[in-house]
Image: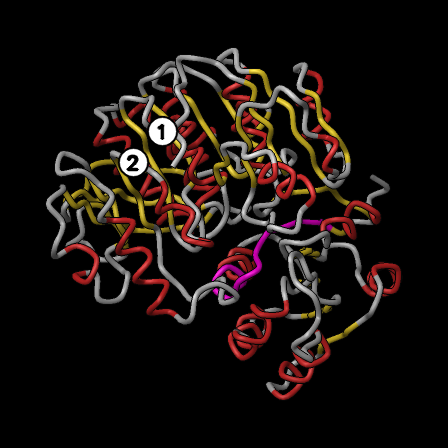
Protein backbone atom coordinates (compact mmCIF):
# COMPACT_ATOMS: atom_id res chain seq x y z
CA UNK A 1 0.00 0.00 0.00
CA UNK A 2 1.17 3.51 -0.82
CA UNK A 3 2.40 5.34 2.29
CA UNK A 4 2.05 9.12 2.64
CA UNK A 5 4.88 10.94 4.38
CA UNK A 6 3.01 13.55 6.38
CA UNK A 7 6.23 15.50 6.88
CA UNK A 8 6.58 16.06 3.13
CA UNK A 9 3.42 17.80 1.84
CA UNK A 10 2.14 16.76 -1.59
CA UNK A 11 -0.96 17.42 -3.74
CA UNK A 12 -3.84 15.10 -2.76
CA UNK A 13 -7.14 14.87 -4.64
CA UNK A 14 -10.23 13.77 -2.66
CA UNK A 15 -13.05 12.07 -4.62
CA UNK A 16 -16.14 12.78 -2.52
CA UNK A 17 -14.57 15.64 -0.59
CA UNK A 18 -17.94 16.96 0.63
CA UNK A 19 -18.60 14.05 2.99
CA UNK A 20 -18.54 14.76 6.72
CA UNK A 21 -15.40 12.67 7.26
CA UNK A 22 -13.62 13.41 3.98
CA UNK A 23 -14.05 17.17 4.38
CA UNK A 24 -12.54 16.95 7.85
CA UNK A 25 -9.53 14.96 6.68
CA UNK A 26 -8.98 17.39 3.82
CA UNK A 27 -9.01 20.27 6.29
CA UNK A 28 -6.52 18.55 8.62
CA UNK A 29 -3.91 17.99 5.91
CA UNK A 30 -4.58 21.40 4.35
CA UNK A 31 -3.49 22.92 7.67
CA UNK A 32 -0.36 20.74 7.49
CA UNK A 33 0.57 22.59 4.26
CA UNK A 34 -0.59 19.91 1.83
CA UNK A 35 -2.11 21.10 -1.44
CA UNK A 36 -5.69 19.81 -1.56
CA UNK A 37 -8.34 19.65 -4.26
CA UNK A 38 -11.32 17.40 -4.81
CA UNK A 39 -14.86 16.90 -6.06
CA UNK A 40 -18.37 16.12 -4.91
CA UNK A 41 -21.69 15.53 -6.61
CA UNK A 42 -23.33 18.62 -5.14
CA UNK A 43 -22.49 21.85 -3.39
CA UNK A 44 -23.05 21.99 0.38
CA UNK A 45 -22.04 24.05 3.42
CA UNK A 46 -19.08 21.68 3.82
CA UNK A 47 -17.82 22.21 0.26
CA UNK A 48 -18.31 25.96 0.68
CA UNK A 49 -16.27 25.87 3.88
CA UNK A 50 -13.45 24.00 2.14
CA UNK A 51 -13.44 26.55 -0.66
CA UNK A 52 -13.15 29.33 1.94
CA UNK A 53 -9.91 27.64 3.05
CA UNK A 54 -8.51 27.86 -0.47
CA UNK A 55 -9.31 24.28 -1.49
CA UNK A 56 -10.45 23.84 -5.09
CA UNK A 57 -13.71 21.84 -5.17
CA UNK A 58 -15.27 20.60 -8.42
CA UNK A 59 -19.04 20.03 -8.40
CA UNK A 60 -19.74 16.96 -10.50
CA UNK A 61 -17.23 14.19 -11.09
CA UNK A 62 -15.43 14.11 -14.45
CA UNK A 63 -12.11 12.68 -15.56
CA UNK A 64 -10.76 16.07 -16.58
CA UNK A 65 -11.24 17.39 -13.03
CA UNK A 66 -8.04 15.69 -11.89
CA UNK A 67 -5.22 18.26 -12.09
CA UNK A 68 -2.07 17.23 -13.91
CA UNK A 69 0.13 17.65 -10.84
CA UNK A 70 -1.85 15.38 -8.45
CA UNK A 71 0.44 13.10 -6.41
CA UNK A 72 -2.17 10.85 -4.74
CA UNK A 73 -5.93 10.23 -4.69
CA UNK A 74 -8.17 9.51 -1.68
CA UNK A 75 -11.71 8.19 -2.30
CA UNK A 76 -14.77 7.31 -0.22
CA UNK A 77 -16.37 3.88 0.12
CA UNK A 78 -19.22 5.11 -2.10
CA UNK A 79 -16.85 5.52 -5.07
CA UNK A 80 -16.65 2.56 -7.44
CA UNK A 81 -14.37 1.59 -10.31
CA UNK A 82 -16.75 3.01 -12.91
CA UNK A 83 -16.49 6.51 -11.40
CA UNK A 84 -14.81 8.66 -14.10
CA UNK A 85 -12.33 10.24 -11.68
CA UNK A 86 -11.44 6.88 -10.13
CA UNK A 87 -10.97 5.39 -13.60
CA UNK A 88 -8.79 8.35 -14.65
CA UNK A 89 -6.60 7.93 -11.54
CA UNK A 90 -6.16 4.23 -12.38
CA UNK A 91 -5.37 5.11 -15.99
CA UNK A 92 -2.65 7.53 -14.82
CA UNK A 93 -1.34 4.94 -12.35
CA UNK A 94 -1.70 7.42 -9.49
CA UNK A 95 -1.25 6.19 -5.89
CA UNK A 96 -4.73 5.62 -4.41
CA UNK A 97 -6.00 5.20 -0.85
CA UNK A 98 -9.49 4.67 0.52
CA UNK A 99 -10.71 7.18 3.11
CA UNK A 100 -10.19 4.59 5.86
CA UNK A 101 -6.64 3.77 4.73
CA UNK A 102 -5.77 7.47 4.62
CA UNK A 103 -7.26 8.07 8.08
CA UNK A 104 -5.37 5.07 9.44
CA UNK A 105 -2.07 6.44 8.15
CA UNK A 106 -2.89 9.86 9.59
CA UNK A 107 -3.48 8.35 13.06
CA UNK A 108 0.12 7.14 13.19
CA UNK A 109 1.29 10.76 13.45
CA UNK A 110 -0.26 11.18 16.92
CA UNK A 111 0.99 9.98 20.27
CA UNK A 112 -2.40 8.74 21.46
CA UNK A 113 -5.00 7.94 18.77
CA UNK A 114 -8.49 7.20 20.16
CA UNK A 115 -11.15 5.47 18.03
CA UNK A 116 -14.83 5.36 19.04
CA UNK A 117 -16.74 2.46 17.48
CA UNK A 118 -20.15 0.83 17.81
CA UNK A 119 -23.25 0.45 15.67
CA UNK A 120 -24.93 3.35 17.56
CA UNK A 121 -23.82 6.39 19.52
CA UNK A 122 -20.43 7.06 17.90
CA UNK A 123 -21.02 10.72 17.08
CA UNK A 124 -22.52 11.57 20.47
CA UNK A 125 -19.83 9.76 22.46
CA UNK A 126 -17.03 11.22 20.34
CA UNK A 127 -18.57 14.65 20.92
CA UNK A 128 -18.81 14.10 24.69
CA UNK A 129 -15.17 13.02 24.79
CA UNK A 130 -14.24 16.00 22.62
CA UNK A 131 -15.81 18.31 25.22
CA UNK A 132 -13.80 16.57 27.96
CA UNK A 133 -10.50 16.91 26.08
CA UNK A 134 -11.24 20.56 25.29
CA UNK A 135 -12.28 21.34 28.88
CA UNK A 136 -8.98 19.81 30.05
CA UNK A 137 -6.97 22.05 27.67
CA UNK A 138 -5.31 19.09 25.96
CA UNK A 139 -5.35 20.75 22.51
CA UNK A 140 -6.76 17.65 20.76
CA UNK A 141 -7.15 16.97 17.06
CA UNK A 142 -10.77 15.94 16.50
CA UNK A 143 -12.63 14.25 13.64
CA UNK A 144 -16.36 13.97 14.37
CA UNK A 145 -19.18 12.56 12.26
CA UNK A 146 -21.44 15.50 13.01
CA UNK A 147 -21.36 19.23 13.62
CA UNK A 148 -20.25 20.08 17.17
CA UNK A 149 -21.16 23.56 18.41
CA UNK A 150 -18.08 23.82 20.63
CA UNK A 151 -15.78 23.82 17.58
CA UNK A 152 -18.38 25.17 15.10
CA UNK A 153 -17.79 22.25 12.77
CA UNK A 154 -16.72 18.62 12.62
CA UNK A 155 -12.96 19.07 12.71
CA UNK A 156 -10.35 20.62 14.96
CA UNK A 157 -6.62 20.61 14.28
CA UNK A 158 -4.59 20.58 17.50
CA UNK A 159 -1.27 19.24 18.68
CA UNK A 160 0.15 15.83 17.82
CA UNK A 161 -0.71 14.32 21.22
CA UNK A 162 -4.39 13.30 21.05
CA UNK A 163 -6.23 12.30 17.88
CA UNK A 164 -9.89 11.43 18.46
CA UNK A 165 -12.05 9.99 15.67
CA UNK A 166 -15.12 7.91 15.03
CA UNK A 167 -14.46 4.39 13.76
CA UNK A 168 -17.18 3.11 11.43
CA UNK A 169 -17.58 -0.62 10.81
CA UNK A 170 -19.22 -0.25 7.38
CA UNK A 171 -17.09 -1.96 4.69
CA UNK A 172 -14.70 -2.82 7.56
CA UNK A 173 -13.32 0.72 7.40
CA UNK A 174 -12.13 0.72 11.00
CA UNK A 175 -9.85 -2.24 10.33
CA UNK A 176 -7.50 0.19 8.56
CA UNK A 177 -7.05 2.21 11.77
CA UNK A 178 -4.22 2.25 14.33
CA UNK A 179 -5.80 3.17 17.70
CA UNK A 180 -4.07 3.13 21.07
CA UNK A 181 -7.44 3.38 22.83
CA UNK A 182 -10.46 1.69 21.25
CA UNK A 183 -14.04 2.17 22.45
CA UNK A 184 -16.91 -0.21 21.55
CA UNK A 185 -20.34 1.10 22.54
CA UNK A 186 -22.49 -1.76 21.20
CA UNK A 187 -22.62 -4.39 18.45
CA UNK A 188 -25.95 -4.86 16.63
CA UNK A 189 -27.06 -6.14 13.24
CA UNK A 190 -26.71 -3.31 10.73
CA UNK A 191 -25.25 -2.56 7.29
CA UNK A 192 -26.56 -5.89 6.05
CA UNK A 193 -25.90 -4.78 2.48
CA UNK A 194 -22.25 -5.45 3.36
CA UNK A 195 -22.20 -7.86 6.33
CA UNK A 196 -23.76 -11.31 5.98
CA UNK A 197 -25.33 -11.37 9.45
CA UNK A 198 -24.77 -10.43 13.09
CA UNK A 199 -21.99 -12.97 13.51
CA UNK A 200 -20.15 -11.43 10.57
CA UNK A 201 -20.44 -8.02 12.26
CA UNK A 202 -19.22 -9.43 15.58
CA UNK A 203 -16.25 -10.96 13.77
CA UNK A 204 -15.40 -7.55 12.34
CA UNK A 205 -15.52 -5.90 15.77
CA UNK A 206 -13.34 -8.66 17.18
CA UNK A 207 -10.74 -7.88 14.51
CA UNK A 208 -11.00 -4.22 15.55
CA UNK A 209 -10.11 -5.15 19.16
CA UNK A 210 -7.09 -7.07 17.88
CA UNK A 211 -5.68 -3.86 16.39
CA UNK A 212 -4.97 -2.55 19.88
CA UNK A 213 -1.32 -2.86 20.99
CA UNK A 214 -0.29 -4.61 24.19
CA UNK A 215 0.08 -1.26 25.96
CA UNK A 216 -3.29 -0.07 24.61
CA UNK A 217 -6.77 -0.14 26.15
CA UNK A 218 -10.18 -1.41 25.09
CA UNK A 219 -13.11 0.43 26.69
CA UNK A 220 -16.16 -1.73 25.99
CA UNK A 221 -19.80 -2.08 26.99
CA UNK A 222 -20.13 -4.98 29.39
CA UNK A 223 -23.72 -5.38 28.17
CA UNK A 224 -22.59 -6.76 24.81
CA UNK A 225 -23.68 -10.38 24.48
CA UNK A 226 -20.89 -12.92 25.08
CA UNK A 227 -18.33 -10.20 25.76
CA UNK A 228 -15.62 -12.81 26.34
CA UNK A 229 -15.60 -13.48 22.60
CA UNK A 230 -14.07 -10.03 22.14
CA UNK A 231 -11.81 -9.86 25.19
CA UNK A 232 -10.45 -13.30 26.13
CA UNK A 233 -7.54 -13.30 23.68
CA UNK A 234 -6.52 -9.66 24.13
CA UNK A 235 -3.20 -8.67 25.69
CA UNK A 236 -4.23 -5.03 26.23
CA UNK A 237 -6.07 -3.56 29.22
CA UNK A 238 -9.88 -3.97 29.17
CA UNK A 239 -12.23 -1.51 30.90
CA UNK A 240 -15.98 -2.20 31.03
CA UNK A 241 -18.97 0.12 31.40
CA UNK A 242 -22.72 -0.39 31.37
CA UNK A 243 -25.78 -1.37 33.36
CA UNK A 244 -24.19 -3.71 35.94
CA UNK A 245 -22.50 -2.36 39.06
CA UNK A 246 -19.84 -5.07 38.67
CA UNK A 247 -18.54 -3.29 35.57
CA UNK A 248 -15.70 -0.79 35.98
CA UNK A 249 -18.13 2.09 35.35
CA UNK A 250 -21.89 2.07 35.89
CA UNK A 251 -24.75 4.34 36.97
CA UNK A 252 -27.24 4.25 39.84
CA UNK A 253 -30.18 6.42 40.90
CA UNK A 254 -30.91 7.55 37.33
CA UNK A 255 -33.50 10.31 37.15
CA UNK A 256 -34.72 12.77 34.50
CA UNK A 257 -35.41 16.48 34.66
CA UNK A 258 -38.37 18.30 33.09
CA UNK A 259 -36.69 18.17 29.63
CA UNK A 260 -35.81 14.48 29.82
CA UNK A 261 -32.11 15.04 30.59
CA UNK A 262 -30.72 12.37 32.95
CA UNK A 263 -28.57 12.63 36.05
CA UNK A 264 -27.11 9.74 38.00
CA UNK A 265 -24.69 8.52 40.64
CA UNK A 266 -21.45 7.43 39.02
CA UNK A 267 -20.20 4.06 40.27
CA UNK A 268 -16.61 3.01 39.84
CA UNK A 269 -16.28 -0.73 40.48
CA UNK A 270 -19.60 -0.57 42.32
CA UNK A 271 -18.60 2.29 44.61
CA UNK A 272 -20.37 5.66 44.41
CA UNK A 273 -17.90 8.41 43.48
CA UNK A 274 -19.90 11.46 42.32
CA UNK A 275 -23.12 12.83 40.82
CA UNK A 276 -23.24 13.33 37.03
CA UNK A 277 -25.75 15.58 35.23
CA UNK A 278 -26.22 15.60 31.45
CA UNK A 279 -27.74 18.17 29.09
CA UNK A 280 -28.82 15.60 26.48
CA UNK A 281 -31.91 13.38 26.63
CA UNK A 282 -32.36 9.66 27.02
CA UNK A 283 -31.00 6.81 29.12
CA UNK A 284 -28.84 5.73 26.17
CA UNK A 285 -26.80 8.86 26.75
CA UNK A 286 -26.10 7.74 30.31
CA UNK A 287 -24.18 4.81 28.83
CA UNK A 288 -22.52 6.97 26.18
CA UNK A 289 -21.34 9.27 28.96
CA UNK A 290 -19.97 6.32 30.97
CA UNK A 291 -17.75 5.41 28.01
CA UNK A 292 -16.53 9.02 27.78
CA UNK A 293 -15.90 9.18 31.53
CA UNK A 294 -13.95 5.91 31.43
CA UNK A 295 -11.71 7.31 28.69
CA UNK A 296 -11.26 10.65 30.46
CA UNK A 297 -10.35 8.82 33.66
CA UNK A 298 -7.83 6.69 31.77
CA UNK A 299 -6.19 9.85 30.42
CA UNK A 300 -5.83 11.23 33.94
CA UNK A 301 -8.40 14.02 33.56
CA UNK A 302 -9.91 14.97 36.94
CA UNK A 303 -13.57 14.22 37.52
CA UNK A 304 -14.58 17.84 38.13
CA UNK A 305 -13.33 18.72 34.64
CA UNK A 306 -15.18 15.73 33.17
CA UNK A 307 -18.42 16.73 34.95
CA UNK A 308 -18.24 20.31 33.69
CA UNK A 309 -17.58 19.13 30.14
CA UNK A 310 -20.51 16.70 30.12
CA UNK A 311 -22.92 19.25 31.56
CA UNK A 312 -21.84 21.78 28.89
CA UNK A 313 -22.49 19.29 26.07
CA UNK A 314 -25.98 19.89 24.67
CA UNK A 315 -25.76 17.55 21.69
CA UNK A 316 -24.74 17.59 18.03
CA UNK A 317 -26.79 18.31 14.94
CA UNK A 318 -29.47 15.71 14.15
CA UNK A 319 -29.22 13.98 17.55
CA UNK A 320 -32.51 14.82 19.34
CA UNK A 321 -31.92 18.34 18.06
CA UNK A 322 -34.42 21.05 18.94
CA UNK A 323 -35.34 22.70 15.63
CA UNK A 324 -37.98 25.18 16.77
CA UNK A 325 -41.62 25.68 17.60
CA UNK A 326 -44.62 26.51 15.43
CA UNK A 327 -48.15 26.98 16.71
CA UNK A 328 -47.11 25.57 20.08
CA UNK A 329 -45.79 22.37 18.44
CA UNK A 330 -42.17 21.53 19.35
CA UNK A 331 -40.14 20.08 16.47
CA UNK A 332 -37.19 17.77 17.19
CA UNK A 333 -34.99 16.12 14.56
CA UNK A 334 -33.08 12.90 15.10
CA UNK A 335 -30.72 10.76 12.98
CA UNK A 336 -32.12 7.44 14.27
CA UNK A 337 -32.28 4.95 11.38
CA UNK A 338 -31.89 1.58 13.16
CA UNK A 339 -34.51 -0.07 15.40
CA UNK A 340 -32.29 0.21 18.49
CA UNK A 341 -31.81 3.93 17.84
CA UNK A 342 -35.53 4.46 17.24
CA UNK A 343 -36.36 2.82 20.57
CA UNK A 344 -33.80 5.02 22.35
CA UNK A 345 -35.18 8.19 20.76
CA UNK A 346 -38.85 7.38 21.43
CA UNK A 347 -38.06 6.37 25.01
CA UNK A 348 -36.20 9.67 25.46
CA UNK A 349 -39.22 11.52 24.06
CA UNK A 350 -41.45 10.05 26.77
CA UNK A 351 -39.52 12.12 29.33
CA UNK A 352 -39.77 15.28 27.20
CA UNK A 353 -42.77 17.57 27.84
CA UNK A 354 -45.63 16.97 25.39
CA UNK A 355 -49.34 16.31 25.08
CA UNK A 356 -49.17 14.00 22.07
CA UNK A 357 -46.14 12.55 20.29
CA UNK A 358 -45.87 12.51 16.49
CA UNK A 359 -43.09 10.60 14.77
CA UNK A 360 -42.31 11.03 11.06
CA UNK A 361 -39.95 8.24 10.05
CA UNK A 362 -38.05 7.93 6.77
CA UNK A 363 -36.52 4.43 6.40
CA UNK A 364 -32.91 4.44 5.17
CA UNK A 365 -31.92 1.98 2.40
CA UNK A 366 -33.93 -0.92 1.02
CA UNK A 367 -31.60 -3.61 2.38
CA UNK A 368 -31.78 -2.34 5.97
CA UNK A 369 -35.56 -1.92 5.78
CA UNK A 370 -36.10 -5.43 4.43
CA UNK A 371 -33.62 -7.16 6.76
CA UNK A 372 -34.93 -5.48 9.92
CA UNK A 373 -38.60 -5.00 8.96
CA UNK A 374 -40.10 -6.69 12.04
CA UNK A 375 -37.66 -4.89 14.35
CA UNK A 376 -38.55 -1.53 12.77
CA UNK A 377 -42.24 -2.20 13.32
CA UNK A 378 -41.68 -3.20 16.95
CA UNK A 379 -39.55 -0.09 17.61
CA UNK A 380 -41.92 2.36 15.92
CA UNK A 381 -44.86 0.82 17.76
CA UNK A 382 -43.53 2.63 20.85
CA UNK A 383 -44.69 5.84 19.19
CA UNK A 384 -48.14 7.35 19.57
CA UNK A 385 -48.81 8.78 16.09
CA UNK A 386 -46.65 7.37 13.29
CA UNK A 387 -46.19 8.86 9.82
CA UNK A 388 -44.03 7.12 7.21
CA UNK A 389 -42.20 8.67 4.27
CA UNK A 390 -40.80 6.76 1.31
CA UNK A 391 -37.52 4.88 1.77
CA UNK A 392 -34.42 7.02 1.32
CA UNK A 393 -32.30 4.95 -1.12
CA UNK A 394 -28.86 6.45 -0.34
CA UNK A 395 -26.38 4.28 -2.25
CA UNK A 396 -28.99 1.71 -3.40
CA UNK A 397 -31.54 1.20 -6.15
CA UNK A 398 -34.98 -0.30 -5.58
CA UNK A 399 -34.49 -3.91 -6.64
CA UNK A 400 -35.79 -5.70 -3.53
CA UNK A 401 -39.51 -5.06 -3.98
CA UNK A 402 -39.75 -3.37 -0.58
CA UNK A 403 -41.50 -0.12 0.38
CA UNK A 404 -42.65 1.96 3.34
CA UNK A 405 -46.15 0.63 2.72
CA UNK A 406 -44.90 -2.81 3.78
CA UNK A 407 -43.71 -1.30 7.06
CA UNK A 408 -47.06 0.47 7.47
CA UNK A 409 -48.84 -2.88 7.08
CA UNK A 410 -46.60 -4.42 9.78
CA UNK A 411 -47.46 -1.59 12.16
CA UNK A 412 -51.17 -1.90 11.45
CA UNK A 413 -50.92 -5.63 12.17
CA UNK A 414 -49.55 -4.66 15.59
CA UNK A 415 -52.66 -2.56 16.15
CA UNK A 416 -50.99 0.80 15.52
CA UNK A 417 -52.49 3.64 13.51
CA UNK A 418 -49.94 4.52 10.85
CA UNK A 419 -50.13 7.07 8.02
CA UNK A 420 -48.09 6.75 4.82
CA UNK A 421 -47.62 9.53 2.27
CA UNK A 422 -45.53 9.43 -0.90
CA UNK A 423 -44.39 13.05 -0.73
CA UNK A 424 -43.07 15.48 1.87
CA UNK A 425 -45.70 18.02 0.78
CA UNK A 426 -48.48 15.61 1.75
CA UNK A 427 -46.80 14.85 5.07
CA UNK A 428 -46.41 18.54 5.91
CA UNK A 429 -50.05 19.25 5.03
CA UNK A 430 -51.18 16.33 7.22
CA UNK A 431 -49.10 17.52 10.16
CA UNK A 432 -50.37 21.09 9.89
CA UNK A 433 -53.93 19.78 10.01
CA UNK A 434 -53.42 17.32 12.89
CA UNK A 435 -50.71 18.54 15.27
CA UNK A 436 -51.93 20.79 18.09
CA UNK A 437 -50.33 23.15 20.58
CA UNK A 438 -48.38 21.21 23.20
CA UNK A 439 -47.60 18.31 20.86
CA UNK A 440 -44.08 17.02 20.14
CA UNK A 441 -43.12 16.26 16.54
CA UNK A 442 -39.98 14.20 15.83
CA UNK A 443 -38.63 13.83 12.30
CA UNK A 444 -36.46 10.73 12.24
CA UNK A 445 -34.07 9.09 9.80
CA UNK A 446 -30.64 9.37 8.17
CA UNK A 447 -31.92 10.80 4.88
CA UNK A 448 -33.47 14.18 4.08
CA UNK A 449 -36.49 13.90 6.42
CA UNK A 450 -35.02 16.84 8.35
CA UNK A 451 -36.37 19.04 5.54
CA UNK A 452 -39.94 18.46 6.72
CA UNK A 453 -39.31 20.25 10.01
CA UNK A 454 -37.30 22.94 8.27
CA UNK A 455 -40.15 23.60 5.82
CA UNK A 456 -42.72 23.76 8.59
CA UNK A 457 -40.54 26.27 10.44
CA UNK A 458 -39.98 28.30 7.28
CA UNK A 459 -36.23 27.60 7.23
Callout 2: SS = loop
Counting from the top left corner in percent of width and height, residue 98 is at 49, 40
Q: How many numbered marks does the figure carry?
A: 2
> Is tag 1's residue or tag 2's residue first in the polypeptide sequence?
1
Alpha-carbon span between mark 1 and mark 2 = 7 Å
Counting from the top left corner in percent of width and height, residue 265 is at 28, 44
Horizontal side of 15 relative to 283 (left or right) equals right
Labels 1 & 2 near each other (Cβ < 8 A): yes
In depth, the one of 44 and 398 nearer the eye is 398
In depth, the one of 350 and 144 nearer the eye is 144
Q: Residue 107 carries which label?
A: 1
Counting from the top left corner in percent of width and height, residue 31 is at 52, 14
The quadrant of the picture occupied by the C terminus is: top right
Q: Which of the 4 image quarters holds residue 196?
A: bottom left
- Magenta stretch in the rendered image: 330-343
**Image position of 220 with respect to 63: above or below:** below
Q: Does 335 appear in magenta?
A: yes
Crowding near the residue tagged with mark 1, few <14, some 14–19, many ≥20 C-alpha atoms within 10 Å:
many
Q: Residue 179 carries which label?
A: 2
Q: Does 164 appear in magenta?
A: no
Amino acid sequence: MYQINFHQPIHIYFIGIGGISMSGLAEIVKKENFRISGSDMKESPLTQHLESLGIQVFIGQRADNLPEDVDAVVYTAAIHEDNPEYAEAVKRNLPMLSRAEFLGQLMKNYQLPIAVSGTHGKTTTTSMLSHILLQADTDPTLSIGGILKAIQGNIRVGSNQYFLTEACEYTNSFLSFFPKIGIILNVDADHLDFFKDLEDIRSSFKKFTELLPQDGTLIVSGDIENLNYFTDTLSCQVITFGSNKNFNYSAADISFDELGCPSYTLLRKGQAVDHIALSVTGIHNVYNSLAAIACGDLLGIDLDTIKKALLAFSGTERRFEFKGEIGGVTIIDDYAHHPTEIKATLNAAENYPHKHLWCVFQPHTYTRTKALMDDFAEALALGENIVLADIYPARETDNLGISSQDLAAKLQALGKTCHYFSSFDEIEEFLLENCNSGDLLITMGAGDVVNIGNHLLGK
